[in-house]
């Protein structure tokens, strides 16, 4: 019985030694409660081993056999309790490791959402920042909702904040459309002319020129309108805007 108790205590020591590296790798030695729990378990284990050694060294006779049996039983009970505490602590460590893993996975996902994204903007490959995309989308949402009064400054703010953005041409175009929707032809002409001048290869450049011509017509500037339409047909032949320009020229004659 004494030998069994001694072997059991060795088993507990081995379990505790094997558990310690896992605790350290989990980063729990920075946690005061975990550190105290380990120290307490080791102290209790040392005490058990001392008592086992004393039992093994004692000279056993008939008068003390019962006492030794009781002592061994107590030791077995205490070792069982220690084993239970170790199992609980091991379970806590496993749960903590899972929580840490979940935390890092969640953190990684959040960081990925903040990373710039490579995408195609107006037919060209571009890298777009998260806040940049959000600002442009918010301005577009205002325009689509018919809130042209607030859409115009939203596009202007976007262009000021992100002057190198791949969305600059589109922002300039929709700024002009925001003005046009408010029947502000002078601002429309200015915005659309800026688009054609700065981004002549932009997909919306032909439409921008068509809008410019339309505004000149509304402002009773027939000559300027006609000249704009002729330039549109010359610079962007084969486009739908060029075909529309031909139709408008016929009506202006």
Image (cartoon, helix red, strand yellow):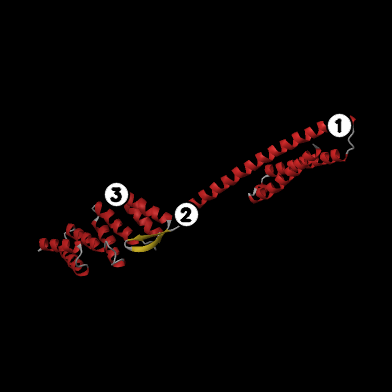
Percent position (x, y) of residue 92? 63, 41
* Circle 1 residues within 10 Å: few <14, some 14–19, many ≥20: few
Considering depth in this image, is 91 or 252 the residue closer to the camera?
91
The answer to whether any part of residue 167 appears in the image is: no
Q: Is residue 66 left or right of residue 144?
A: right
Q: Residue at x 52, y 50 (%)?
A: 105
Q: Residue at x 54, y 47 (%)?
A: 102
* Circle 3 residues within 10 Å: few <14, some 14–19, many ≥20: few
Q: Is residue 51 left or right of residue 115?
A: right
The residue tagged 3 is 144
Check if mark 2's residue and mark 3's residue have beta carbons within 8 Å: no
Distance CA(mark 2)–CA(mark 3): 29 Å
Single out the residue that lies furthest toward the bottom: 234
The residue tagged 1 is 65
Check if mark 3's residue and mark 1's residue have beta carbons within 8 Å: no
Q: Secondary structure at mark 2?
A: helix
Mark positioned earlier in the residue sequence (3 or 1): 1
Percent position (x, y) of residue 138? 36, 50
Q: Secondary structure at mark 1?
A: helix
Image quarter of residue 220: bottom left
Image quarter of residue 249: bottom left
The answer to whether any part of residue 178 appears in the image is: yes
Q: Is residue 64 left or right of residue 107?
A: right
Q: Nearer the viewer, mark 1 or mark 2?
A: 1
Distance CA(mark 1)–CA(mark 2): 70 Å
Residue 176 sits above or below residue 236 on the image: above
* Circle 2 residues within 10 Å: few <14, some 14–19, many ≥20: few
Q: Which mark is residue 112?
A: 2
Q: Nearer the viewer, mark 2 or mark 3?
A: 2
Considering depth in this image, is 45 or 115 the residue closer to the camera?
45
Q: Residue at x 25, y 54 (%)?
A: 180
Q: Secondary structure at mark 3?
A: helix
């Amino acid at each position: 019985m004494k030998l069994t108790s001694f072997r059991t205590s060795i088993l507990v020591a081995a379990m505790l030694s094997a558990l310690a590296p896992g605790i350290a790798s989990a980063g729990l030695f920075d946690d005061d409660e975990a550190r105290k729990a380990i120290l307490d378990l080791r102290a209790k284990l040392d005490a058990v081993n001392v008592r086992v050694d004393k039992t093994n060294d004692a000279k056993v006779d008939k008068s003390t056999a019962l006492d030794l049996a009781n002592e061994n039983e107590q030791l077995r009970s205490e070792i069982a309790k220690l084993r239970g505490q170790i199992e609980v602590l091991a379970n806590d460590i496993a749960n903590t490791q899972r929580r840490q893993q979940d935390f890092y996975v969640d953190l990684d996902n959040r960081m990925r959402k903040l990373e710039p994204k490579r995408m195609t903007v107006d037919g060209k490959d571009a890298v777009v920042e998260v806040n940049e995309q959000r600002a442009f989308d918010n301005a577009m949402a205002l325009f689509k909702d018919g809130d042209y009064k607030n859409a115009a400054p939203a596009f202007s703010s976007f262009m000021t904040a992100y002057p190198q953005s791949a969305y600059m041409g589109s922002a300039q175009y929709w700024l002009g459309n925001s003005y046009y929707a408010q029947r502000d032809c002078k601002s429309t002409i200015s915005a659309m002319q800026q688009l054609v001048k700065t981004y002549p290869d932009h997909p919306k450049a032909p439409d921008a020129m068509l809008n410019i011509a339309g505004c000149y017509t509304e402002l009773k500037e027939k000559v300027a309108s006609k000249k704009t339409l002729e330039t549109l047909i010359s610079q962007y032949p084969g486009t739908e805007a060029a075909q529309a320009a031909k139709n408008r020229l016929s009506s202006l004659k």
